[in-house]
Image (tube, grey):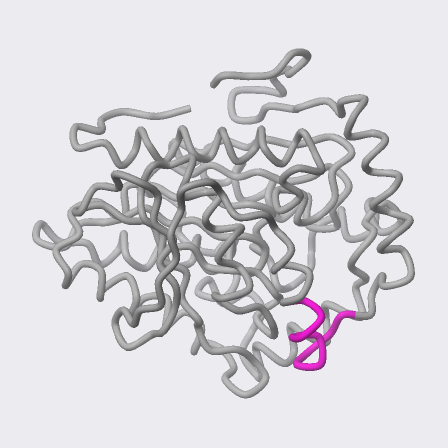
């Protein structure tokens, strides 16, 4: 992997990126802004404010945006110049399965598309509480199969937050059902994925004060709205508990100041221990959603650059082996 100065390895499957001086200053300013909102964004009432936040991500140069419906699921294409016609990425947006929209996320997803050099489709999967589990996963799978029906030869998955967990769940489902005519995705890259809806990771306690956004009661309520009476350890809802053997390459990025830190660490460790090509990038001093801070945080552009390189290599016509 191309790294910035000071990056260090934390073992065979993890890399730690130190906080830059610029990001240290930007982090202080961000925390002053969002501090009064900690634990308050919740459920359907948060949809407008959350979309407003995500809509502020700057658009990437040259990327065009077009509404479409894939596999019966509406969403937006984010297409960079000279994108190949037979490759695509599905990006599943964040919002704790209760909020978020393709339109609000399109500029953030466009940043990924520009770096990957490939068109990315972000679907408007159904949200809880109106549409509880497994509606979101059903929509994600329908979108993936719809792209296969459009003769997309190479498809990768990306996702952030809850969408990151959804992408990893979809990766497991599509890999298990892959056939010669409908192969598995070529890989997945996720940002701060929610992999454990049982909230069993130690970082729910060790990062409780450091995380500027989430509290356990806040997120537990949204998890209940999403799961209904389903077990939080259902692997289709919490990919940490699923079969991780034999998956395509997986890359995970997470901030060190997140309550979701252990969701990322434990998932990658399980996948790597199972013999998979799974690697983790931990960004010191960064909070949840830092990658959307393009133009604000050095770490945002650097993490998206790493994701873009991974996707370019995995989606190349002759892709083979690992990419990092």
Give the residue at x 91% y 61%: 36
**Foreground residue, 259 or 56?**
56
Give the residue at x 9% y 49%: 180
Give the x, y percent position of residue 102. 48, 66
Give the residue at x 33% y 32%: 312
**Image position of 320 (left or right of 267):** left
Give the x, y percent position of residue 307. 46, 35
The verdict on residue 134 being magenta is no
**Depicted 307 relative to depicted 163: above or below:** above
Q: Quadrant of residue 281?
A: top right
How many numbered marks, from 0 up? Answer: 0
Q: Quadrant of residue 121?
A: bottom left
Give the x, y percent position of residue 117. 33, 37
Give the residue at x 70% y 48%: 288
**Foreground residue, 147 or 114?**
114
**Depicted 121 relative to depicted 305: above or below:** below
Residue stretch in magenta: 41-50
Magenta part mainly helix, strand or loop? Answer: helix
Give the x, y percent position of residue 287. 74, 44
């Amino acid at each position: 992997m191309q790294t910035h100065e000071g990056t260090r390895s934390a073992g065979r499957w993890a890399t730690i990126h130190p906080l830059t001086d610029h990001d240290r200053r930007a982090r202080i300013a961000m925390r002053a802004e969002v501090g009064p909102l900690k634990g308050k964004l919740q459920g359907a009432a948060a949809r407008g404010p959350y979309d407003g936040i995500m809509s502020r991500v700057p658009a990437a140069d040259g990327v065009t945006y077009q509404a479409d419906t894939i596999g019966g699921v509406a969403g937006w294409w984010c297409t960079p110049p000279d994108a190949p016609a037979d490759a695509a990425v599905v990006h599943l947006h964040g919002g704790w399965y209760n909020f978020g929209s393709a339109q609000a996320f399109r500029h953030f997803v466009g940043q990924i598309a520009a770096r990957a050099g490939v068109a990315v489709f972000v679907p408007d999967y159904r949200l809880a509480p109106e549409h509880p589990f497994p509606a979101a996963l059903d929509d994600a799978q329908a979108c993936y199969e719809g792209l296969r029906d459009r003769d997309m030869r190479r498809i990768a998955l990306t996702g952030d937050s809850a969408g990151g967990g959804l992408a990893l769940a979809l990766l497991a489902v599509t890999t298990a059902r892959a056939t010669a005519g409908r192969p598995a995705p070529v890989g997945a890259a996720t940002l701060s994925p929610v992999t454990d809806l049982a909230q069993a990771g130690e970082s729910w306690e060790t990062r409780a004060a450091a995380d500027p956004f989430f509290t356990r009661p806040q997120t537990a309520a949204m998890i209940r709205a999403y799961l209904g009476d389903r077990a939080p350890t259902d692997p289709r809802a919490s990919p940490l508990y699923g079969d991780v053997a034999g998956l395509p390459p997986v890359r995970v990025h997470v901030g060190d100041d997140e309550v979701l830190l252990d969701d990322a660490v434990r998932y990658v460790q399980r996948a790597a221990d199972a013999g998979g090509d799974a690697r983790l990038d931990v960004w010191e001093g960064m909070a949840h959603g830092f990658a959307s801070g393009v133009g604000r945080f050095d770490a945002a552009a650097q993490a998206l650059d790493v994701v873009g390189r991974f996707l370019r290599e995995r989606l190349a016509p002759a892709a083979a082996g690992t990419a990092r």
